[in-house]
Image (cartoon, grey):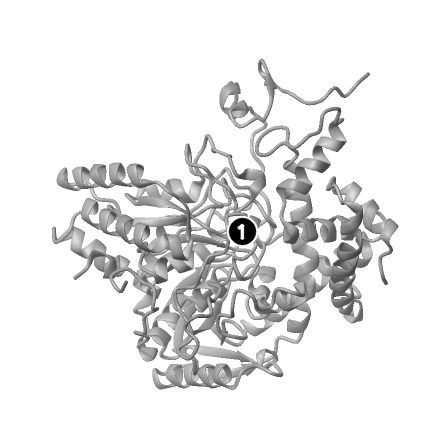
Amino acid sequence: MHPTDFTLRGAIEALNEGLVTSVELTEAHLRAIEALNPRLNAFTTVTAEQALAQAKASDARRKEGIAGPLEGVPLAIKDLFCTAGVRTTAGSRILGNFIPPYESTVTANLLRDGAVFLGKVNLDEFAMGSSNTTSAFGPVENPWSRANDPDTRLVPGGSSGGSAAAVAARLALGATATDTGGSIRQPAAFCGIAGIKPTYGRCSRYGIVAFASSLDQAGPVARTVEDCAILLRSMAGFDPKDSTSAEVPVPDFAAACARGVKGLRIGVPKEYRLDGMPAEIEALWQQGLDWLRAEGAETVEISLPHTKYALPTYYIVAPAEASSNLARYDGVRFGLRVAEKGSDLKDLYERTRAAGFGAEVRRRIMIGTYVLSAGYYDAYYLKAQKVRALIKRDFDEAFGKVDAIVTPATPSAAFGMDEKQDDPVTMYLNDVFTVPANLAGLPGLAVPAGLDAQGLPLGLQVLGRAFDEETVFAVGTAIEKAAGFDALPRLRAGAV
Amino acid sequence: MSLDTATIRRIASLARIRLEEEEVGRMQAELNGILGWIEQLQSVDTEGVEPMAGGGAVSLRMREDVVTDGGIPEQVLANAPDREGEYFGVPKVVE
């Protein structure tokens, strides 16, 4: 078996049995990156030397009889997580040369558990986007392509497009990602892999470049639901350095995958049946519900009446928080500085931020600044916070009746790199099914469930109660098993 | 409501983002497109609803008011575009 073909769990077992070493696994993935990254552009920084040193140290630890839960497993890290001594760009020109002196809590947790870091992966600038086309380091290509139109290059989704493309193309066994409005689940669905945004507060935000602090959550993407569960257990946990980190125990998520769904009540929100949604997505959704019923679950129609207001609410709350968070990029303490001879301080700020931020980031800072400005705060921001409370209330009431909710993950399959780029609002509609979970702080998992007529992957989404990722993993595993999804992208390690 | 070009310039100034004259029209069209779309929130009845500020249900913790780190000026200044001694360098602010 080629070392890049392992699942993460399979790799851990092979390492434990001595069938493969971490150095062998790491070298195989580095070779795959060398072969495919020039085309995919998934990695912004490859830390080959450091990865091999970590792999050697891991193999040595294993010989000593010390092995963490992720001992020797090569991973990719979204370039939004600060990594000590390794450039962290957030996909932005303004942080293009930023080398953090400290490690994010999530990546520190992974290192503690023995993981090897192959490098940093591309993303939409400051995680703002659904196509990974806003990165200052160029777009990422989806390793999948349409069967009848193989030359059109497709987006991997975003913002965690590099994470999803790298894992789908087998350049890493798993990757870290973040999700503010769908940035884990949408790219996972577009690339035919699994990804979970856990409950808000489950993973520490310390050391993750901030976008919208009340919505941002870290989570893993991997090729199986169980692999996500293994990674999440290592990533999660209370951290005093993040005031919103939840002081709750971290369960054995992987054990929950095998629970089954017998007797579970699965909610089917009628408001997620959109006009104009492709028939094959509707059909896949029904298929998913049939699978769950066949395994002994009961499906229940529910109503989440404020669903249609989730996106407009998000596009007030997220830009408002972003405009505040991104005020720190001022050309003074770190990152890019642009000034003319004779620039005063305000001119330095304005030139630095105009040159350092791309169009989508500038747009969102402008929207956020406007909705927070004197005279408009109540009409926009306060109103959005109230609607957000209603969206959360819808979920609270639904979870009184059901144990989990199943919906499509995205309203379409992956689209072409040149499509949906003309109008910001068209791009925003990609996140129609994923944004509500961020607003309500709930866990959401994307699981690959089938292919569309063009051979592109489609995903289903499982939503759960706050801090009940275990039920989400159980439902996701049941869908994954029933779907038997074994299609592979055209661009992948070993195939080219 | 629709933003005029003077408002676009004022927001850019508040956001400390330099906007070239030829960029104003496009920014105006994009912002008005987005604001027109989010206008639909005004039709939601939010009478008596408490605004939701944070992302989680947990209330924020208090901690002892003590210094937890410090004494690392080299690390703090390591990424500074300009520095003088142990200070960040900026253009002259006071005449």
Quarter assignment of residue A276 = bottom right
| Element carrying mark 1 | loop
Q: Residue furthest top?
A: B85
Q: Say what amino acid the circle numbered 1 marks.
A: Ser
The x, y position of residue A21, in whole percent, is 16, 47
- Label 1 Cα crowd, 10 Å radius (few <14 / some 14-19 / many 20+): many
Residue located beneath label 1 in the image: A135
Q: Is residue B10 left or right of residue A28?
A: right
Q: Residue at x 58, y 39 (%)?
A: A94
Residue A435 shows in this picture: yes
Q: Residue at x 69, y 53 (%)?
A: A363
The x, y position of residue A163, in whole percent, is 42, 55
Q: Tell me the subunit letter for badge 1.
A: A
Query: Against B51, is B68 above or below?
Result: above
Nearer to me, A131 or A198: A131
Count of marks placed on residues: 1
Quarter assignment of residue B29 = bottom right
